[in-house]
Image (cartoon, grey):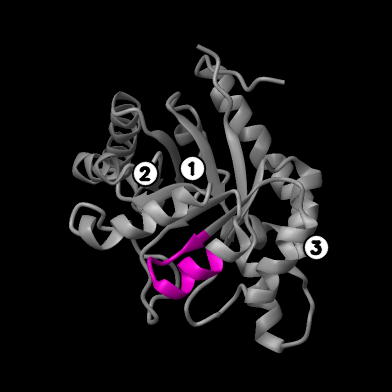
Amino acid sequence: MKRDLRLGVNIDHVATIRNARGGGHPDPVHAAKAAEAAGADGITAHLREDRRHISDDDITNLMAAIRVPLNLEMAATEEMLGIALRHKPHAACIVPEKRQERTTEGGLDAAGGVDQLAPYVTALKDAGIRVSLFIEPDRGQLEAAVKLRAPVVELHTGAYCEAKGEERERQFRRIDEAARTAEELKLECHAGHGLTFDTVGAVAAIPTIIELNIGHFLIGEAIFGGLESAIKRMRALMDKARAEAGGERSA
């Protein structure tokens, strides 16, 4: 079966650079539009409680400026729910969030937080927003997503990307098994966090994953060769891996 593989580009760290000095440059909206031009299928932005990178105005401006879908990463809080319901992005991905972390350190504990998460999932779905849960590649977490009636999961690939040797192989097997289990459970499966030119191929080749969300690495590479070049190279690596696995991206 031929399957599409989408690329979502996270533009959070363009805002991180802007905020380091203040002012309006570099503009995350400019980055989002460049990502569109380079072939991104969607834009991801994480509005954190402490507004360390993306701001409320950025979300407003992105909603007005981009043509591809916006995926709003958000914590399960009343404040973030209100913002999501006001803007109504195409998608909202519920993620864990701690003020002291540098970046999202792991997946959401959906299995341990079904009662707490359920009202947020329901409210977002009722507003016509596609809901995903950012989780570890674990069957218990996948089953919790089914219980919550979240239609999409995004598997955390950070441990795989950071591991070496046999441990990387073990972490990859976890992702592969979870992605196949997701399809059995009728969940749409995405993946992301820490993916690079070197690590994306194996994940892109998993046939039951249909979207990868990549940000920090692409913004870092943009310093040396430009954002559009980095995205086009990532897109080409993804497509090559999927084609060689027998699931070439549709035109």
Query: Does dot 2 land on a helix, a strand or a loop?
Result: loop
Which residue sits at x=18%, y=58%?
112
Which residue sits at x=21%, y=59%?
115
Q: Amino acid at mark 3?
A: His
Q: Amino acid at mark 1?
A: Thr
Residue 141 location, x and y as percent? 24, 46
Which quadrant is the C terminus positioned in?
A: top right
Which residue sits at x=29%, y=24%?
184
Tell me if I can see residue 115 in this picture.
yes
The mark lying in front, picked from 1 and 3, is: 3
Mark 3 packing: few (<14 Cα in 10 Å), some, or many (20+)?
A: some
Query: Does dot 3 land on a helix, a strand or a loop?
Result: helix
Residue 239 location, x and y as percent? 62, 28
Tell me if I can see residue 226 in this picture.
no
**Residue segment shown in magenta:** 73-84
In the displayed structure image, the side of residue 74 where residue 150 appears, left or right: left
* Residue, disc 3: 30
* Residue, disc 1: 199
| Callout 2 touching callout 3 (CB < 8 Å) | no
In the displayed structure image, the side of residue 101 where residue 139 appears, left or right: left
Q: Front-most of 227 and 132?
A: 132
Earlier sequence position, callout 1 versus callout 3: 3
* Residue, disc 2: 150
Residue 172 location, x and y as percent? 33, 38
